[in-house]
Amino acid sequence: KFAVGGQKLYVRLFQRKLNWLKVNKIEYGEISTDLSPIIEELAEAQFLQTESELEDLCEALDLLSAPELKTLAKLFHLPNPNIQKQQLVDDFLRLAKQRSVFSMSQTGIGTVILNRVKNLAGKCVRVCKGPRAVFSRILLLFSLPESIEGEEAGSAGQGQLSTVLAVNMGHIVFPSYTVNRKTQVFQDREDLIRYATAAHLSNDTANAMVNAKWEEAYSLYMCAKETWNQLKNHPSLSYHSGLPEYLRRFTVGWVYTRILSQGVEILQRRHMYKEAVQELKSLLSQDVYCTDSRGRWWDRLALNLHQHLKNTKKAIDCIRNGLADPFVRTGHRLALYQRALRIRESPSCKQFRCLFSDLPVITVEDVAHVTIKGKMCPQLGMGKSVFLMENVGDEEGCEDVSVSTVMCSVEELALTHYRQNGFDQGIHGEGSTFITLYGILMWDIIFKDDIPDVFRNSYQTCPLDLYTDSFYENRRDVIEARLQQLHTASSETLAKLIADVWTTQEGKAAALVSWERFASLQQVQSLVSCLGGVFLSGVFRHLSKDLRHCRGGLPDLVVWSTRTNHFKLVEVKGPSDRLSHKQMIWLSELKKLGAAVEVCHVRAIGGKSNHLS
């Protein structure tokens, strides 16, 4: 057992990346001004490795600063010691592979470089992998990550430790609920280790893709494919398939399926379209894992069959099957249908038009479109459009950029337009405005106590089933009762319902609630008074039944008038933006629910005018 100093230092090192660290760079004054004896204690107990175990040249070179690497490069007469750090590392690794003239050993020069690096680096340590993996698995068992897509799922659980620390210090307060673990997710130690291994591999694959390391991503994908093929007949899998979806996300099959799904993009990057089609067909042949990705898989399959393999008949069959798949929802259904329309209208597909007759028709009602103009700021590089706007009251027609000229986003420009048109209140929150209202008015239902396995530790911001069909199924009666209550609620009742939650829960960490979205409780009450219970209950019905697919696509702006009690929902589109499928569906649905809805297009004009028109 370590003394308190040893415990504190280990936790801090555990939370850092698994890299070698120079001892003279490890500073935690709050633990001790001299950490050497504590580091020695941890090393003796085999919780830390020391430089005597540092044998990988790449890891050793990573320890050195850029100036140290340049010094070393001059010592070994590298041709260009002033290049970037990563290029120097690559040059050293190439040099290490050369055979030394003076030694019969293959690794002669590599060993010489390694020794020089270690001399330059001085004392260094790294957290031992064995104990670290054990702690990582303990943290994983303690708290299944709410979002398996998150980095936390593939990390060693460091984020969870930070959360516990923040709670203990009073920096984060979680909602109140009862932890109720009824079902065992992992059958035994090996099952947990298999899951943890898969989660790390998934995280590595995602990181390689984000950093455009496509060769590395391909080799990780192939490794995952081979491992999953060996595991497919494992007896634990039949147990996993019987778990509810929100627990099945924490099984080895779900994680490997997600890696294979990432593999489709990796294969397409390598122009391996036949292999991508095979992978997609394999993914779609099962409906146990990653069912929320099926819409995307069908669309990718149709795209590859039509564009890359030129097999239009199979692409149409694929779209038909996709539209009949109960797991394909909202935006993905519309995307598939619109792909079918594009194929049908293309001149090269005339002979296949008869195949479209039995496809279900998906219609989306269009909404009003308005266009405003604004002066665009000259931009360097890519990024969101930035506009210039003068404060109202500046002289008309002034060409000089005055002190009162401000840079603003396309949405802020639109808010100003609506303010000038009588809407004195406005929020640019995209989906988070409505999602926050939903989180507040459904608070007690979201954190309802009597559903097993949805709250498995004290540090959750939402139940584990929130983004699955089970959320509605598990709470159908109370959700329907709340929707009915909202449907008939007066402005006063809505204001009280909001106030009851706001005054008791404000600031607590809840996944759906962005407390900072509103300036005050009064602003929220003002908005719900304008929206009304009938409209809110209609929006909330969609969110309750399928939050996973309905949380995206809500309009950018909500504007309202406190004088007339009218509101408008606005999707803002800059000079080169287009509506997404989810946005089209939401705009159509919101219009059906009785809202005033419009798309506001912002057109860029030249430098002659600074004024919004």
Image (spheres, rainbow, N blue to C red):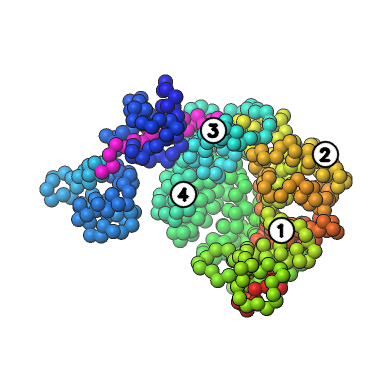
Query: Alpha-carbon neighbours of circle 4 within 10 Å: few (<14), some, or many (≥20)?
Result: some
Query: Alpha-carbon neighbours of circle 1 within 10 Å: few (<14), some, or many (≥20)?
Result: many
Measured in 3D between alpha carbons, the distance from the residue under mark 4 to the one under mark 1, in whole angstroms, is 33 Å
Q: Name the residue under label 2.
A: 481
Q: Name the residue under label 4.
A: 207
| Callout 3 amino acid | Leu
**Marks 2, 1: nearer the viewer:** 1
**Where in the figure is residue 248, as x and y percent of width and height?**
59, 37
Measured in 3D between alpha carbons, the distance from the residue under mark 2 to the one under mark 1, in whole angstroms, is 29 Å
| Residue 95 is at least partly visible in this image | yes
Q: Name the residue under label 1.
A: 557
Measured in 3D between alpha carbons, the distance from the residue under mark 3 to the one under mark 4, in whole angstroms, is 27 Å
The answer to whether 288 is drawn above or below residue 215 in the figure is above
| Callout 4 amino acid | Asn
Q: Is mark 4 on a helix, strand or loop?
A: helix
Along the viewing direction, whichever of 399 and 18 lies nearer the viewer? 399
Q: Do the residues labelled 3 and 1 touch (CB within 8 Å)?
A: no
| Callout 2 amino acid | Ala
Callout count: 4
Question: In which quadrant will I find the N terminus?
Answer: top left
Query: Alpha-carbon neighbours of circle 2 within 10 Å: few (<14), some, or many (≥20)?
Result: few
